[in-house]
Each structure stands twice: as structure tokens, then as C-alpha cells.
Image (tube, rainbow, N blue to C red):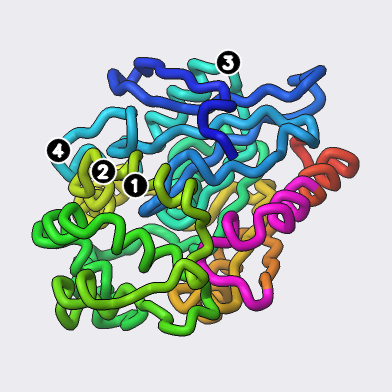
Amino acid sequence: MDPASFNHRVAQLSTGRTYHFVDQLPENYKPRRTPTLLCVHGFPDCWYQIGPWTRKGFRVVVPNMLGYGDTDRPQHPSEYSTKKLCADLAALLDFVGVQRAVVIGHDWGAFTAGRFALWHPDRLHALVILSVPYTPPTPQYMPVEKVAKLAPDLAYQAYFASAQSSKDLDAHLLQFLRMSFQKPHSTKSFSPNQLLSGPEEILTKLKIQDSDIILGPKELAYYQQVLQKGMNEPLNYYRTARYRYEEERDASLPSKLREDLPVLFLYGTRDTTCTNAVISKSHKFISRLQTIALEGRGHWVMVEAKDEVTEMIAAWLEELMTRPPKPAL
């Protein structure tokens, strides 16, 4: 899809930060009948993976998140805490004149969307999270190094949290993108944990065929264009553990989401970072959780199964609107 064909906007929000975002209005839009979808991307991503929900009558607002593209790029990791990101998202909704939205998040965006439901529970009609299950605030501070030990599949996060990762990924950005967007059935399957054994060697020597990548050449080039401004800022999300913990502790943030909030979780069965144990645990904190597994899909469900995911989410929302919960959509 042509990035220039979308309605791009730039705004300084009431939080003082400037965001670039795409704002797609469907034909004959009826805001009182159809909610706005606020989409939140993860790493290494951007606004670009947007589902064609406007065909279903939804308004779709998709920001480049803090640190990406033409959105502000503060240097210090503390600026990327989810409390501050969620304040930005609430301010973005204010700017576009939307009181409540359906919030959809993938990867870091899924984590942020889940926290948005805690920091600003009155701003959501419904919540959709992709690939990363909901996890509650932790009762004790857990540094990323400890997370890496307790959850070996997430060990790469310790590398991403290091200063060295910014230098390595800037120097080998295209190769890193090719590795990140490999097909789950790739002949030379790449796990980000491989970077722990020697990032320089992996980033320079691992050969990936074009046929093993889920992005086309134009899509890959666009990602490179957006991210070549520097990887330090996107990687700052991995450096926020202490700031997030302190903010959530000081606010006594609850563990459970709003009881009447409908939540849909979609994930690929070949996503090695998404474990059944964490998915099962999330049911303890979400009263109205529906889970759908996408067989044979990996982490990038909005790329691998865009039409399928778009239809599933649209059908789920349409069912909510025809048989509305209390309070209604």
C-alpha cells in the first residue's frame, strides 16, 4: 500500500509532545453509530500496519509512537514510560475529538494498550491486544535482566535494553529488519535471542532469502526509511522497567481491567514469545476476555494475516454493537 495515500496529520498534544498520526475516515462516517479505532504499534514497527477497517465504517487513528518517524524523539528512557505514553494517547483522542475508542495494540503496543485500560479506563469502549498477552503491574521491581532469566524466550530484551544495541542496530538496520520480519516457517528461522551470543556476527553473517521475509521490497524499504532516523529511541521502550514500576506503585494501579470491558486477544501459534502459561494467567485479570489462536502464524499477525485479523476484529466489534454490553458501545 502507498503510504502517501493515507491522511497524515501532525499535532502538538496537550502533553507538550508532537505526534505524527494517520487519521482515516470512512465514507458516510457516523461517529455516534461506529466507534473510533486507536491503533498502537510495537517494535520495530510504525503506523504502516493498519487494517482496512474503514471499509467496515470505522474511523482509524494510528500514531507513530514516541521515538518513531516524525513523532517526537526524546533521548531519555524515562520519557517512554507507559504512564506518559498513555497520557499522550489520551491527549491524541482529545485532539481528534473522541471521548472513547476501541484501542488495538500489537507487541509493545499491546502492553501499552493494556496499561491504557488501567491509567484511563473511562476512555475505552473495548480493547484488542495482539501477540503479547496482558500482564498486571508487578508488586516488586523486576529488572529486565531478571525477566530474561525467568523467561528465557524473552532474554533478548536484556540486549535491547543495553546501550550497545542502539549502535549495533543502527549499523545493520536493514539486516535487522530482514531478521525481524522473517516468516515463521523460514528455512533459517531467526530468534532475537541469537543476538545474545554475538550480535555483530549474527547481524553481518546470517543470510536471509527474500522468500523468507513477510514484507515485500517496498514495505521493507519504507520501514528502513522510518527507522533510519535512529534506533536508540525505539529501543528506549526496553529501558523503562524501573520508571514503569515506580509510577504504577505510586499510583496503586490495579491489576484487573475494568470488569465490563470487552477484551479480545489474538496471537499466532508459532510466536515463540507468546506462551500458553501467560495467556492462561491473563484470564485472572480480565473478566470479559476472548482468546483466538491463529494457527501457523508468527508474531507479526497484522502482516501475515491482515485480512483475517481485520475481519475477526470487525466481526467481534459488530457483535458487541448489535448485542451491546453495559455500558454500550
> Looking at the image, is mark 4 or mark 1 nearer the viewer?
1
The answer to which of 135 and 75 lies nearer the viewer is 75
Check disc 2 and give the amino acid type.
Gln
In the image, taking residue 329 as reference, residue 212 lies left or right, namely left
Q: Which residue is mark 2?
A: 228
User: Which of the two labelled residues, at mark 4 and mark 2, occupies the earlier sequence position?
Assistant: 4
Would you name the residue on which mark 3 appears?
Answer: 97
Residue matched to label 4: 75
Q: Which residue is mark 1?
A: 224
Contact between marks 4 and 2 (CB within 8 A): the answer is no
Contact between marks 2 and 3 (CB within 8 A): the answer is no
Quadrant (top left, top right, bottom left, bottom right) of the N terminus: top right
Within the image, what quadrant is residue 12 found in?
top left
* Secondary structure predominantly adopted by residues drawn in magenta: helix
Report the front residue among 113 and 70.
Answer: 70
Mark 3 or 4 closer to N-term?
4
Q: Amino acid at mark 4?
A: Gln
Q: Are marks 4 and 1 in contact (CB under 8 Å)?
A: no
Q: CA distance from mark 2 to mark 1?
A: 6 Å
The stretch drawn in magenta includes residue 104: no
Residue 306 horizontal/vertical position (percent): 66, 54
Task: Report the residue at 50% width, 41% height from top.
Answer: 48
Task: Give whichever of discs 4 and 1 has the lower sequence position.
Answer: 4
Q: Amino acid at mark 3?
A: Gly
Is disc 2 in contact with disc 1, using a CB cutoff of under 8 Å?
A: yes
Q: Quick check: can you spot residue 153? A: yes
